[in-house]
């Protein structure tokens, strides 16, 4: 939680604290090592790496939020429909979900963004589509477990319509696993988006997105290791923080995993 809160604070107020322009090039200052003038050094164009890391944190959070939101918005309704109605509806949705899950996560996102074209927006769409079958399968399984509970049967016997049963009785009781999956998919989305940017299919230069910063720094790994190590460590810490948070939420929200 501390790591996540720090990341959010950096994205919110960091640009005001670090006023350096992340896009301002200074050829005479290129590849300068960390110093009092440039805490994290400069890149191959003389841009301040600290400023680019701070401004890039906003892009990183935005990528994770949009990607997870796409998975939630599409996967949750599909999972509810498949789990509640079953039969043909479940068969069609499950077949499509299984086909999407047959592809490795990164390759699926790579294929989608290759078809749409390289850009940050298309990368977020591709990563979001990648998460849809994960949310669909989880929500479907949770819905099947809840739909035969006594309170759902009572609501159905009282004449409640399917829409009301789904929205008032089933959906609120499957929120916990959805929150856990969202918290775990957030860092996965960040990692996949960074990989797409590294391949030139995500954020395009001169964007301070961390994955694209790795592309420029990889050529100077020996002469200026800070140019690639700093964004790499930033990605690692972000993914680690959200993974730890997701694991903690899972242990807290699942009664079976609570320690007495």
Image (tube, rainbow, N blue to C red):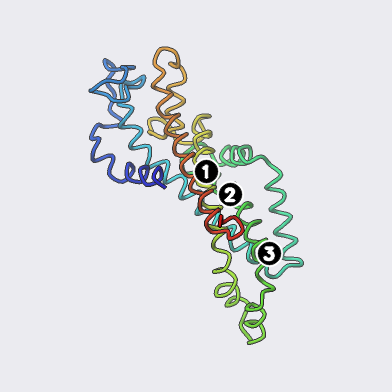
- Residue 239 vs 100, above or below: the answer is above
Residue 44 appears in which quarter of the rendering? top left
Q: Nearer the viewer, residue 117 or 110?
A: 110
Whether residue 181 sits left or right of residue 26 in the image: it is: right
Whether residue 237 sits left or right of residue 74 in the image: it is: left
Whether residue 69 sits left or right of residue 56 in the image: it is: right
**How would you rate the neighbour count of disc 2 (Cα within 10 Å): few for under 14, some for 14-19, many for 20 or more?**
many
Give the label on residue 64, or none. Answer: none
> Which structural element holds mark 2?
helix
Residue corresponding to mark 1: 189
The residue shown at (30%, 26%) is 48
Residue corresponding to mark 3: 82
Q: Nearer the viewer, residue 180 or 216?
A: 180
Residue 5 is situated, as x and y percent measured from the top left of the image, at 37, 47
Q: Residue furthest bottom?
A: 158
The residue shown at (67%, 61%) is 141
Dot 3 or dot 2: first in sequence order is 3
């Amino acid at each position: 939680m501390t790591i996540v809160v720090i990341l959010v604070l950096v994205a919110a107020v960091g640009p005001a604290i670090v006023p350096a322009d992340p896009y301002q090039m200074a050829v005479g200052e290129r590849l300068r090592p960390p110093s009092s003038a440039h805490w994290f050094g400069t890149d191959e164009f003389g841009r301040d790496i600290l400023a680019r890391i701070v401004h890039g944190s906003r892009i990183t959070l935005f990528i994770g939020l949009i990607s997870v939101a796409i998975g939630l918005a599409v996967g949750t309704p599909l999972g509810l429909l498949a789990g509640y109605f079953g039969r043909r509806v479940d068969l069609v949705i499950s077949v499509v979900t299984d086909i999407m899950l047959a592809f490795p996560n990164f390759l699926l996102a790579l294929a989608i963004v290759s078809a749409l074209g390289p850009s940050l927006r298309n990368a977020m769409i591709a990563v979001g589509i990648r998460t849809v079958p994960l949310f669909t399968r989880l929500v479907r399984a949770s819905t099947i477990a809840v739909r035969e509970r006594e309170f759902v049967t009572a609501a159905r016997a009282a004449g409640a319509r399917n829409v009301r049963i789904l929205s008032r009785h089933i959906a609120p009781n499957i929120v916990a696993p959805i929150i856990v999956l969202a918290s775990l998919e957030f860092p996965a989305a960040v990692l996949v988006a960074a990989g797409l940017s590294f391949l030139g299919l995500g954020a395009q230069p001169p964007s301070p997105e961390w994955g694209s910063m790795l592309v420029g720094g990889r050529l100077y790994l020996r002469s200026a290791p800070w140019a690639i190590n700093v964004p790499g460590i930033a990605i690692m810490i972000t993914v680690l923080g959200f993974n730890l948070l997701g694991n903690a939420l899972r242990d807290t929200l699942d009664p079976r995993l609570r320690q007495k």
